[in-house]
Image (spheres, rainbow, N blue to C red):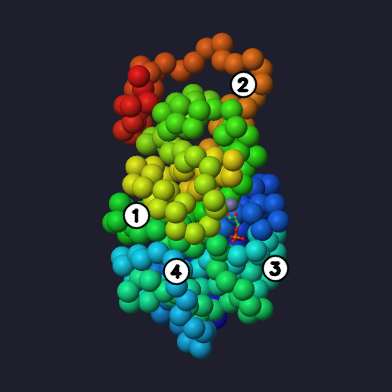
Amino acid sequence: MKVLESKFANEFLNMAERCFSMGWHERNGGNMSYRIRPEEVAEVRGDFTDKNPWVEIGAAIPSMAGEFFMVTGSGKFFQNTKSQPEDATAIVEVDGAGENYRIVWGLVNGGRPTSELPSHLLNHAVKAAATGGKNRVIYHCHPVNVIALSYVLPLEDAVWSRELWDTMTECPIIFPAGVGVIEWMVPGGREIGVASSEKMKTYDVIIWAHHGMFVSGEDFDMAFGLAHTVDKAADILVKIISMGGRKRSISSDDFRRLAKDFGVTLNEDFLK
Ligand code: 13P
Ligand code: ZN
């Protein structure tokens, strides 16, 4: 089977289109990766090349050795991903040491995988370990309200988690662990990847201050749904602050009652 006939590639491209339509991807902003299942790799392997050189990832990720990922290309526009998938995306293979990758499909006009590849792979490693291999999508976007809030709210996990939970009743059910926040860092490369992957041990959503959001999900729908929920909560929070701030709130005990009825465990640190 050709890569572009596969279910996973079509889901990847549909997700990119959906995310672009949300306004989260100006120019080349944002990136995405999917850890391809072995049986999906087997289906499309005949469409791969082994002619490309191995390239250093910039981080050692032994638990991702031998894995294949579909990724967006660096500098490529989400806007064009679905119409020009072979130009804008790639499938990369990680070597047996988890230190190098090579392009086995895509990026036919040259280029390299997203500059955030170290972040993606480090976070895949953390999430695969934390979920028994279930989580397969890592997604990064530049949503307006989240970025705006990062200039106003203290850059603390507890503040963001409680503020976002308290915008819409179902937020704590969608992200019961809360959200992690990272102060401004240079994008791309290992450092922001390591900082994010530390937070990803606890959370599924990381706020990159003055930059964007980084999420993990089991599949494309779950990753999109999570980013969508956080973006909507941030939008409501911007409106609350713009209207002069909260006049009332959901109480800690209300959150606990909600958690009990919906069978989720909320981070008690954020219910003080
Ligand atoms: P890339 O085009 O390299 O994916 O970079 C976009 C981005 O959002 C970096 O954080
Ligand atoms: Zn970015």
Please identify, in this view, whether the residue under mark 1 or under mark 3 is nearer the observer: 1
Q: Is mark 4 within 8 Å of ligand 1?
A: no
Q: Earlier in the sequence, mark 4 or mark 2?
A: 4
Determine crowd level at label 3: few under 14, some 14-19, many 20+ residues with C-alpha closer than 10 A: few
Could you say which is closer to the camera, residue 99 or residue 96? 99
- Is residue 141 shown left or right of residue 133? right
Which comes sooner in the sequence, label 1 or label 4? 4
> What residue is shown with label 4?
57
- The residue carrying pointer 1 sits among few (fewer than 14), some (14 to 19) or many (20 or more) residues within 10 Å by Cα, namely many
Question: What SS does tag 4 mark?
Answer: loop
Q: Residue 148 in the image: x percent, y percent?
A: 63, 34
Residue 83: which disc?
3
Q: Amino acid at mark 1?
A: Val
Q: Quadrant of residue 156?
A: top left
SS type, badge 3? loop
| Nearer to us in this view, 160 or 193 | 193
What residue does disc 1 label? 126
Quadrant in which ligand 1 is drawn: bottom right
Residue 254, how many percent across, how many down? 39, 18
**How far apart in space, not on screen, are marks 4 and 2 (Cα)?**
41 Å
Comes first in the chain, label 2 or label 3: 3
Instruction: Tell me if 95 is positioned left or right of 226 in this view.
Output: left
- Residue at 66% x, 64% y: name it: 76
- Residue 241, numbered label: 2
